[in-house]
């Protein structure tokens, strides 16, 4: 007799538990069919009967009630959209190590930063890097209040309702936990559950999923939480964000607390005193990888002592106290069918391999990068042969590899399979988009031609212009709702928007009917045109770092844009400084190269960009349409906030890097040389010319002890 037909009063406890699990899944599936697919397969009465039976069993066995109980769900709670959640402590990413040498370098860097001797003890933990998506769970007085995705690291999406359906995530913490704690970890799907889900999709004639990670991400970010509930998502806790009082003094200790509070923590996590110990654990985890129930893509090492973690702090988006040792990438063999040249926003000609589709690590790959002309010819960036000098040709059988989310690469060629009539690939010397000569600049430092060939067409090259426009509206730049890469391309070719300024004059031109109105163009209507104008309007006020990033200056990625925004604070002072920095003897230039994190390469790229009159004109014009909001200083309540500080001489309690990082955390700027703009000089023993100059300029000079004293340490 099937369970379904047994009367509730006669169910044993075991049967009741099984029946509740089955009902949760079945009801979730009906919710999904009803709410998402508009395709209910049972009558409302039958649906109600299922919910009734579920409720009756829960009433008889209250302790068996599931966290994803259908009783607690309002139909399929369908949200309009996800609310945004600001992370009070940023969710960071990890730096990667790809070899044992990289791991040893990491440990050396940590020691140097902390001024530890080579033989001083330095314990670290090793644990698998789970291939899922990170989630931050905020508990207040032991109760789950918010669950948020990583998002861009600063702002994520509120997925609390979804997270509540995941069994591994406690609604309330066991034992005594701090008043406020954000437990962070990875949501994932097991390989087996992924396979079952995909079989079901295939059986129903639906699109199958790419891999467990993407599926886990898609399952969590469902506006209809009953879909999340129907997916067997799991969770490992391994990190934390805001915390009112740390429950332990070590990484390992905190993770043990997570387990005591009711979280799943990874059983392969261990603490080691030496790098050799870490590497041994890496090899062990790698050997068990295939047999693990879930996908992992490396091993994470973390400094165990939390005082040391705090001293180490962060560099741009990753902690200095942790590193991800990645497993070698997965490879496959296929045929290189064609080589296509794409022109990027800075004019770089990038060769892309079109491949006979092949599955690599569960993902179908049909394109891969070929890097540049030398790479195809078998020459590395140092001018030395790679692949023992073997070149790559159309028709070749090649090995490709991909690691995690990274774009697949063509790695090697099997010469025994090379067709007899194959010819070496000839890289174009003119731009495929505009026909201008494409040249290789000579690198001043090495005297060798740069490996990248660039279109010299500049402003006349349509490919560069389109890519610049796409970059301008991209997610980390202006991020205009309903205006993505596709629209950028279409607007450009329709002669509606040729450069960023045109975006902000579009509505006025449309109003004046200078061109066919947007609402009368193909693919547009009254509402969608109005929405777009509104979205553009909303972006006239934009964060300064987004504005800087959007300009698409070479070497100025999101991280550098943030550093620049934080340093110059306002668009006006940033642009004035870039114009002044054209003078290589001037103070603005030395200030620029001295910004921590901005090296000479970035500084030169900035100066070059603003030295081009057309760029400067576009930026000035753009600023008549958009008004970037001034950047906030980092920690405005510290005594050093907003000050420009120079460290000189030898420091005893911290390394120079640690000192600079600490100053920046406190909202100060650090500079390498003393000028009239310097507010404070921290001088250690042996300080020479900088100290003298500071004295001449009557700038305050303090020693290291005074520095700590002012911080109350
Ligand atoms: S620690 C402050 N530990 O990897 C650093 N991350 O590449 C916090 N990840 O965004 C991260 N397993 O989503 C940490 N055992 C682990 C991890 C792990 C997977 C993910 C996490 C993070 C990404 C960084």
Image: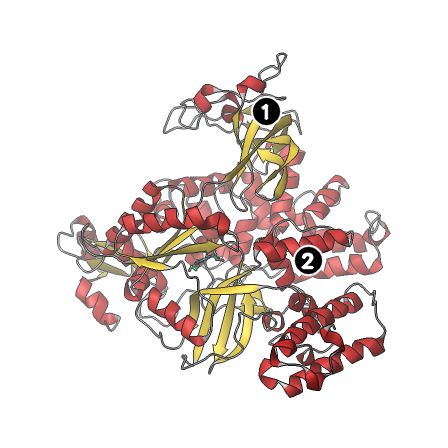
Which residue was labeled with disc 2? 481
- Residue 8: x and y in percent read 71, 84
Question: Considering the numbered disc 2 on the image, is that residue within a helix, a strand or a loop?
Answer: loop
Q: Quadrant of residue 304?
A: bottom left
- Residue 256: x and y in percent read 37, 70
Q: CA distance from mark 1 to mark 2?
A: 43 Å
Its colouring scheme is: secondary structure
When the figure is inspected, residue 441 is found, relative to residue 672, above or below; the finding is above
N-term-proximal mark, 1 vs 2? 1
Q: Quadrant of ligand 1?
A: bottom left
Q: Nearer the viewer, residue 36 or 9?
A: 9
Residue at the outermost front position = 1
Mark 1 surroundings within 10 Å by alpha-carbon count, few (fewer than 14), some (14 through 19), many (20 or more): many
For the residue with label 1, is its CB less than 8 Å from the closest atom of ligand 1? no
Q: Is residue 624 visible?
A: no
The label nearer to you, 1 versus 2, is 1
Q: Quadrant of residue 82?
A: bottom right
Q: Residue at x 52, y 54 (%)?
A: 131
- Residue 621: x and y in percent read 61, 49
Residue at the outermost top position = 421
651 sits left or right of 578 in the view: left
Q: Quadrant of the C terminus?
A: bottom left
When the figure is inspected, residue 253 is found, relative to residue 133, above or below; the finding is below
Q: Nearer the viewer, residue 651 or 287?
A: 287
Q: Residue at x 61, y 54 (%)?
A: 214
- Residue 658: x and y in percent read 28, 57
Q: Quadrant of the N terminus?
A: bottom right
**Which dot marks residue 240?**
none
């Amino acid at each position: 007799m099937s369970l379904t037909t047994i009367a509730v009063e006669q169910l044993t406890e075991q049967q009741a538990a099984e029946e509740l699990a089955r009902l949760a899944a079945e009801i979730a599936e009906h919710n999904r069919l009803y709410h998402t697919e508009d395709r209910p397969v049972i009558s409302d009465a039958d649906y109600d009967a299922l919910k009734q039976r579920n409720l009756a069993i829960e009433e008889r066995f209250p302790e068996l009630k599931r966290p994803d109980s259908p009783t607690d769900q309002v139909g399929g709670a369908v949200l309009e959209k996800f609310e945004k959640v600001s992370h009070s402590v940023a969710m960071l990413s990890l730096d990667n190590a790809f070899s044992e040498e990289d791991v040893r370098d990491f440990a050396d860097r940590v020691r140097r930063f902390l001024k530890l001797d080579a033989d001083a003890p330095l314990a670290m933990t090793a644990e698998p890097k789970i291939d899922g998506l990170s989630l931050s769970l905020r508990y207040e007085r032991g109760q789950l209040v918010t669950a948020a995705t990583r998002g861009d690291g600063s702002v994520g999406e509120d997925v609390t309702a979804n997270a509540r359906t995941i069994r591994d995530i406690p609604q309330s913490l066991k034992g005594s936990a701090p008043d406020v704690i954000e437990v962070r970890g990875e949501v994932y799907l097991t390989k087996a559950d992924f396979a079952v889900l995909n079989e079901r999709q295939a059986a129903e004639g639906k699109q199958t999923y790419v891999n467990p990670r993407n599926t886990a991400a898609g399952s969590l970010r469902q506006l209809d939480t009953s879909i999340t509930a129907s997916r067997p998502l799991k969770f490992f806790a391994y990190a934390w964000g805001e915390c009112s009082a740390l429950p332990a003094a070590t990484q390992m200790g905190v993770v043990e607390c997570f387990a005591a509070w009711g979280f799943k923590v990874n059983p392969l996590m261990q603490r080691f005193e030496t790098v050799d110990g870490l590497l041994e654990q890496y090899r062990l985890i790698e050997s068990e990888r295939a047999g693990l129930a879930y996908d992992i893509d490396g091993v994470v090492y973390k400094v165990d002592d939390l005082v040391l973690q705090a001293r180490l702090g962060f560099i741009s988006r990753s902690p200095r106290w942790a590193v991800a040792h990645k497993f070698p990438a997965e490879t496959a063999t296929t045929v290189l069918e064609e080589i296509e040249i794409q022109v990027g926003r800075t004019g770089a000609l990038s060769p892309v391999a079109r491949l006979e589709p092949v599955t690599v690590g569960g993902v179908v790959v049909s394109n891969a990068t070929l890097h540049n002309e030398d790479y195809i010819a078998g020459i590395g960036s140092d001018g030395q042969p790679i692949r023992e000098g073997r070149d790559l040709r159309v028709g070749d059988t090649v090995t490709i590899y991909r690691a995690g989310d990274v774009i697949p690469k063509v790695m090697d060629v099997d010469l025994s399979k090379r067709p007899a009539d194959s010819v070496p690939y000839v890289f174009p010397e003119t731009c495929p988009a505009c026909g201008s000569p494409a040249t290789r600049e000579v690198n001043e430092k090495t005297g060798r031609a740069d490996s990248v060939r660039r279109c010299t067409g500049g402003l006349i090259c349509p490919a560069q212009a389109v890519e610049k426009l796409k970059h301008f509206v991209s997610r980390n730049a202006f991020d205009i709702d309903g205006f993505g890469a596709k629209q950028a391309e279409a607007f450009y070719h329709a002669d509606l928007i040729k450069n960023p300024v045109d975006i902000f004059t579009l509505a006025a031109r449309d109003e004046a009917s200078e061109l066919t109105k947007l609402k009368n163009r193909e693919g547009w209507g009254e509402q969608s045109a109005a929405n777009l104008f509104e979205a553009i309007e909303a972006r006239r006020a934009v964060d300064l770092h987004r504005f800087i990033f959007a300009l698409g200056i070479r070497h100025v990625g999101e991280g550098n844009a943030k550093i620049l925004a934080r340093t110059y604070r306002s668009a006006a002072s940033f642009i004035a400084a870039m114009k002044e920095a054209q003078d290589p003897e001037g103070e603005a230039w030395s200030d620029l190269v001295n910004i921590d994190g901005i090296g000479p390469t970035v500084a030169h790229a900035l100066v070059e960009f603003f030295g081009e009159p057309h760029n400067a004109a576009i930026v000035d014009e753009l600023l008549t349409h958009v008004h970037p909001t001034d950047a906030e200083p980092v920690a405005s309540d510290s005594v050093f906030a907003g000050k420009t500080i120079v460290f000189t001489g030898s420091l005893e309690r911290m390394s120079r890097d640690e000192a600079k990082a600490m100053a920046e955390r406190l909202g100060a700027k650090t500079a390498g040389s003393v000028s009239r703009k310097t507010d404070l000089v921290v001088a250690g023993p042996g300080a020479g010319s900088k100290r003298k100059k500071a004295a001449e300029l009557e700038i305050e000079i303090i020693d290291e002890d005074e520095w700590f004293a002012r911080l109350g340490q």
